Image (cartoon, rainbow, N blue to C red):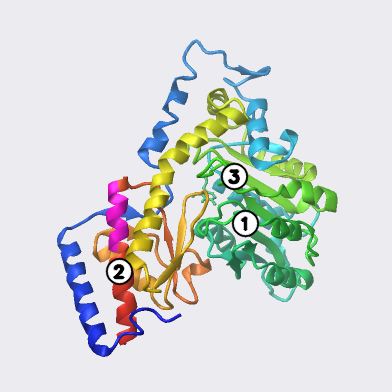
Amino acid sequence: MPTMYQTMSDEELTHALSELEALADKIRARKLSLDMARGKPSPEQVDLSRPMLSVLDADADLFDEGVDCSNYGCFEGIPSARRMGAHLLGCPADQVLALGSSSLLIEHDMLAMFWRKGSLGAMPWSEYAVANDGVRVKALCPSPGYDRHFAISADLGMENIVVPMGAEGPDMDEVEHLVASDASMKAIWCVPKYSNPVGITYSNDVVHRLATMKTAAPDFKILWDNAYCVHDLADAGDELANIFEVARSAGTEDRIVAFASTSKITFPGAGIAFIGASPAGIHEFAHYMQAGLISADKLNQLRHTRFLPDAEAMRAHMQRHAELLRPRFAAVERVLSEGLRGTNCARWTRPHGGYFVSLDGVPGSAKRIVELCATLGVRLTPAGATFPGGLDPQDTNIRIAPSYPTLEELHEALEVLVVAIKLVSAQIVLE
Ligand code: PLP
């Protein structure tokens, strides 16, 4: 479909452009300073967890089911925290480690283990190239995806391979094709629920195909980052199939490595992070981590599980987050659909949870839109960040993170974004 500007006469286009430029000048004069760049909870959301800070005081019982949380020990995490992790990850508690405060750091450590030591008897990934004529090991990166994932695999020296992201998850024909005959394909990054940034939840078919597909690499890993597993915007959230159950019956459980944290449940960067894997996989990783860790912060774990003792408490807490997030996602939908109606200059997602809306402009527009927004006082995630190496081949994708600004700021920022999208789309036609 052509954009509105492509269907205009030269005269109409020049007129539309000068109107948009005048609008942009007016915005610039307001010297705004707005931020829609990173998916951080708002201060009100973070405040929901303040009562947790009073849960443990000087007189508190610091035992969790017989474990003394005030001293070293219990490397695997306290029993109540492992149960919380099991609930989030969908695997048995004895297959979960409750560790520090960042799931991303666990992902980094896990890949470092595969790189340095290999997994379950397979060759370390770092040695693969030496044994295979310099061919590097590869990570599949469904894109648009999460920049920090791609940065971890790239940092180790893996080659990141783009796989298109569709409405049901990664393009599975492509994934199956790539992994079936090439043993250098070692892993796939997945954010299976309310994916960052496209907001979709993997379909049952995609989960099933991932868990059961034939892989040339016997040590292939599905890096299942379930960061948004309980982050529904409405009561009836998306349903994600349990990949552990599918893999267990297919005999492929060793390929699943799942992660989650309470970063967007309680305090970002100060919550509990979890990893779940097969019995053999979790045993191996625990052994690897024990070289550098005696035990994680069990007092923080205890504070969390006293504050959110069961699934019902978690659900009620997440509903309160959703009440704060829903108006923000509604604002994105309203301002974009009103501002861009009939223009065909962009399409965007309408997620049922998570933290992001993913917008695609016309080819060649994303970098320019983000740059223009910056000059107008609105900071967005850098264009391209949602692709490995920051290279969006079509230069269309922009990640919108509506959670942090106030509703008023968000409205303003979105209105600026609408003007920038129109202005850049019109300029592209004229060039
Ligand atoms: N994984 C995904 C998919 C994320 O979007 C984020 C944060 O935005 C993280 C992990 C970071 O989690 P943590 O704070 O537990 O390291």
Q: Residue 190's mark?
A: 1
Percent across and percent down for residue 181 are: 78, 73
Disc 3: which residue: 229
Q: Position of residue 365 (x, y in %)?
A: 38, 75
Please give left or right for residue 18 compared with residue 145 in the image: left
* Front position in the image: 382 or 8: 8
Residue 373: image location, x then y, percent: 29, 64
Between label 1 and label 3, give the one nearer the viewer.
3
Name the amino acid, label 2.
Ala
Q: Main secondary structure of the magenta part?
A: helix
Look at discs 2 and 1 and give the one toward the viewer: 2
For residue 325, side relative to residue 76 (left or right): left
Q: Which residue is mark 2?
A: 420
Residue 210 part of the magenta segment? no
Work out whether 376 lies above or below 356: below
Label placed on residue 260? none
User: Which residues fall within the magenta stretch?
Assistant: 408-416
Q: Secondary structure at mark 2?
A: helix
Does residue 81 appear in this view?
Answer: yes
Q: Depth check: 281 or 246 in front?
A: 246
Q: Is residue 144 left or right of residue 31?
A: right
